[in-house]
Image (spheres, rainbow, N blue to C red):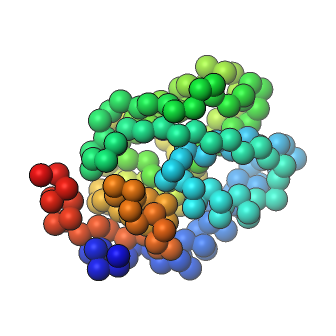
Amino acid sequence: MRGDLERVLFDEPAIHRRLHDIAAQVSNDYRKRELTVIAVLHGSLMFVADLLRRIPLPMKLECLTVSSYRGKTQTSGDVIFKEIPLPEVAGRDVLIVDDILDSGHTLAAVRETLETAKPRSIRVCVLLSKKKQRAREVDADYVGFEIEDEFVVGYGLDFRERYRNLPYIGVLRRELLEQADR
């Protein structure tokens, strides 16, 4: 699978160092409070598991499965929630954890939906944030790494459900994307 990559952006030690820094920030920001973490699946699975083990706070973990790509390299813009009912977050401090902030469609929809339940607070944590104009304006409070607008896989990020299990993050070869778009 490594042969399918143009290059590795972040190796396993770099990811783990950054997780330590984010966990320290979250722990400091929520000290003496209970946190409700909403993991956006499936992409955030690796990230959320490794991150939460580094946060020594009382917390509740909930998961949402949402979809906007559906096997394509570009988002459709339509976000589909697969969990009904949504997690109970009224009066709680909520941290939404996702793998990547790209178009903004998914995170904007998740945030707006959860806000209707009247949580005490909502913050967003992403492993990756693409440096690009977004279709929906969303800010992440915690960002692992900023990246250029490239198609990345590994450490939970996939292309057609493959590559999630790579312990590093890399740029998928352009010709593989072009073949898939045909």
Q: Is residue 55 above or below residue 92?
A: below
Q: Give residue 171's position: percent from left, percent from top.
A: 32, 68
Q: Which of the 4 image quarters holds residue 67?
A: top left
Residue extending farthest left: 182
Q: Is residue 122 left or right of residue 74?
A: right
- Say which residue appears at 40% left-offset and 66% top-offset: 163
Of 169 and 128, nearer the camera is 169
Q: Is residue 174 above or below residue 100?
A: below
Residue extending farthest right: 32
Q: Is residue 16 left or right of residue 108?
A: right
- Say which residue appears at 17% left-offset and 51% top-offset: 181
Quadrant of the image containing the N terminus: bottom left
Q: Is residue 124 among the parts visible in the rendering?
A: no
- Say which residue appears at 62% left-offset and 56% top-offset: 48
Q: Is residue 174 among the parts visible in the rendering?
A: yes
Of 22 and 88, nearer the camera is 88
Q: Give residue 155's position: percent from left, percent from top.
A: 49, 66
Q: Which of the 4 image quarters holds residue 137?
A: top left
Q: Give residue 68's position: percent from left, percent from top.
A: 37, 38
- Say which residue appears at 34% left-offset and 55% top-offset: 160
Q: Is residue 101 left or right of residue 6?
A: right
Q: Give residue 74's position: percent from left, percent from top.
A: 27, 45
